[in-house]
Image (cartoon, rainbow, N blue to C red):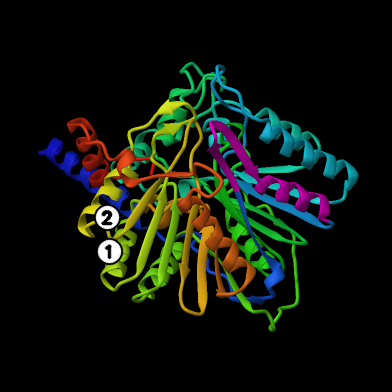
Amino acid sequence: KVLVTLLFLFLVFYIGTILYHEKKPLPMDISYEGEVHQVPEEAVSFLYDLTYQQAGKVKREQQLFNHVFKAIDEAEEFIVLDFFLYNDFYDSDMSFPPLSATLTKKLIDKKKEHPEMEIILITDEINTSYGSHENGQFNELERNGIKVLYTDVDALRDSNPLYSGFWRLFIQWFGQEGRGWIPNAMANRAPDMTLRSYLKLFNVKANHRKTVATDKTAIILSANPHDASADHSNIGFQIDGPIVMDLLQSEQAAANLAGGEKLPAYNMKEQTDGDLQVQLITEGKVLDKTLEMIDGTKSGDDIWMGMFYLAERKVINALLDAHDRGANIRLIMDPNENAFGTQKTGLPNRPVARELNKKTNGGIQIRWYNTTEEQYHPKLLFIKKENEVQITGGSTNFTSRNLDDYNLETNVWIKAPAGTGIAKESEHYFDRLWENEDGEFTLGFEAYQNEFTPLQRVIYTVQKLLYFTTY
């Protein structure tokens, strides 16, 4: 009877731990929705990086970090950055541009030029392999007076509840630090990891944001200053004006998860005469806005999506409903074929694409980005109506992990008249890739629709049921 009682109490405590950490209240200003700001057309820029093939040669067009570097150069009062991946880890048989070191040098040079300026980097523990080792570039930043804050995502809800409940009860108390002895799965050049760091990694949640805030501008990206990601195709938006205040408020919530460092104060007078509306949205508010955008479409409206991961059922169902209403839907998706030189399984995009194609008899049109060793990494939704466009883009993949308040994410929402520059530039981006204008950007739907093996089907089913996945 004693053993049965103890087992019963343990199960109650274990299940209670799972349920609480899956549904617990979010920290203040997590899942944040800023004010809707009116801004002039010239205050908003659409940015992109593209890697593609042209006549047998690899071509690259890169804008994103050029704008980040310029924003750093032009800052006068403060710089606050938040990046998920910021390191030079990759396999020794590969070669990439030194993007992370370039950003590190840019920040240190700025600090030396303006010693009084506050420069703060917020980041994720993945850059120390969850506490297994130090990050040499971050050490260099700190030696030069730049603060580096590591967000503690344990305060967020658990996206992998069956495992995370076990981890919280039995493992987290031992920490992750120590001498690593297990090869690092991220790259063979990365330092070895401890077993306890791997066990924390399996919780699979992160500060996944990619943002820059200065006293002059805000930049919201899908790109990381990560050497092995330097050739990825990505998107971003640069926005001047009072949205900087909202970005700082949302980043204060991230800083609170890293010890409570007070971020710089910033005040700017609200504008009321701009033609564009912009709004900062994070975490679950991105899902709310995405569904509102898609559900608001009608017959004849155009829905474009450029997406690294698409798996959130609410978004998938919203697309199917929009198709039934007569909206024109075109998706450009990463084939989930390659990750830093390693073969991937095609999950989740290929089964999702097959479902959308089958249920609409090809009515939802899909093309695959023609990747090689890089990824098509945008998270971008563009909707064109008769007189206006709506856009959302940033760090947020359209998956449960990214949209359901498990990760830290940042997007921007933009509403603009149809003839404005941001509307034309965004539409041209999609038209160019879809039509393969001056490059071999995309492939037809059939290119990656080989049948899944029984093992792949089992993996996909188990991942959907148990949430044991990285997407």
As drawn, is 99 to the left or to the right of 368?
Answer: right
**Disc 2 target residue:** 356
Q: Magenta residues, as a range?
A: 49-75
User: Residue visible at 59% across and 71% down?
Assistant: 278
Q: Residues within 10 Å of mark 1 (few under 14, many from 20)?
A: some
Any part of residue 457 in sight? yes
Residue 126, placed above or below residue 314: above
> Residue 273: percent from the left, percent from the top?
69, 83
As drawn, is 100 to the left or to the right of 28?
Answer: right
Task: Give the amino acid type for the residue marked by disc 2 in the picture.
Answer: Leu
Quarter occupied by the N terminus: top left
For residue 23: magenta?
no
User: Residue visible at 54% across and 34% down?
Assistant: 55
Q: Nearer the viewer, residue 447 or 226?
A: 447
As drawn, is 355 to the left or to the right of 189?
Answer: left
Residue 455, placed above or below residue 246: above
